[in-house]
Image (tube, rainbow, N blue to C red):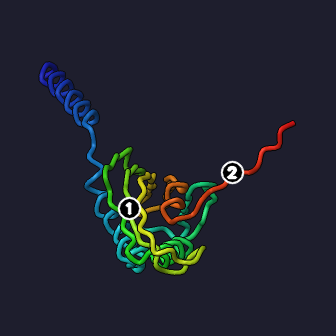
């Protein structure tokens, strides 16, 4: 009996160790939420955000990564983007599931600047690569940090960037 109990304990320990060491597939939980989030950006379906984001969602975008904290500010950002670029589209090129609390996506954004925004519409098509770190908790999105080349975007709109004059001393 003692020998049987020893074998059972050994088997139980090996089984639990094997289960604990298996790589978890976070994509099964995160992908459906992520697809709804992309729907908000790509189609302007803001109602879906009430279901998948927290009220204190935190959006940070380069160049200064200043936090916009609230679901309403997220909705405002999406609305303003889609107003200036009615055909705005985020295409996910790659997903890296860090854990059940974060995913990093490499994406390409495109759009034609035909609407009013922070500047008059140029009519130019734009395309830029970038990445987002999207955070999750309890099955909801809690935040996103967005990084891309805003200089590339501005140049594609037809604007020029003039560096400040450097005075020689």
Q: Is residue 19 left or right of residue 46?
A: left
Vertical arrangement, residue 78 with respect to residue 21, above or below: below
- SS label for mark 2: loop
Residue 102's x, y, as percent? 42, 50
Mark 1 vs mark 2: in front: 2
Position of the N terminus, as image quadrant, is top left
From the viewer's side, name the closer residue of 157 and 86. Answer: 157
Residue 3's x, y, as percent? 13, 19
Q: Which quadrant of the view contains residue 18?
A: top left
Quickly name the residue at label 2: 163
User: In the image, what residue occupies the spot 56% across and 67% down?
Assistant: 56
- SS label for mark 1: loop
Q: Is residue 33 left or right of residue 57?
A: left
The residue sitting at the right extreme is 169
Quickly name the residue at label 1: 139
Q: Residues within 10 Å of mark 2 (few under 14, many from 20)?
A: few
User: In the image, what residue occupies the spot 54% across and 57% down?
Assistant: 150
Residue 117's x, y, as percent? 56, 76
User: In the image, what residue occupies the spot 21% across and 27% down?
Assistant: 14
For the residues labelled 1 and 2, the Cα–Cα distance comes to: 45 Å
Q: Say which label, 1 or 2, has the lower sequence index.
A: 1
User: In the image, what residue occupies the spot 55% across and 62% down?
Assistant: 58
Q: How many marks can you see?
A: 2
The residue sitting at the top extreme is 3
Q: Which mark is residue 81?
A: none
Q: Is residue 68 left or right of residue 6?
A: right
């Amino acid at each position: 009996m003692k020998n049987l109990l020893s074998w059972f304990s050994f088997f139980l320990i090996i089984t639990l160790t094997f289960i604990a060491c298996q790589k978890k597939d976070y994509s099964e939980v995160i992908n459906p939420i992520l697809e709804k989030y992309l729907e908000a950006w790509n189609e302007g379906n803001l109602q879906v955000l009430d279901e998948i984001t927290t009220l204190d969602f935190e959006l940070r975008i380069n160049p200064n990564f200043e936090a916009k904290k609230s679901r309403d500010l997220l909705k405002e950002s999406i609305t303003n983007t889609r107003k200036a670029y009615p055909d705005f589209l985020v295409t996910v090129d790659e997903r890296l599931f860090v854990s059940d609390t974060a995913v990093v996506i490499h994406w390409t954004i495109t759009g034609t600047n035909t609407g009013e925004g922070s500047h008059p519409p140029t009519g130019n098509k734009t395309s830029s690569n970038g990445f987002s770190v999207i955070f999750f908790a309890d099955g909801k999105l809690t935040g996103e940090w967005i990084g891309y080349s805003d200089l590339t975007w501005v140049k594609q709109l037809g604007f020029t960037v003039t560096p400040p004059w450097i005075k020689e001393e």
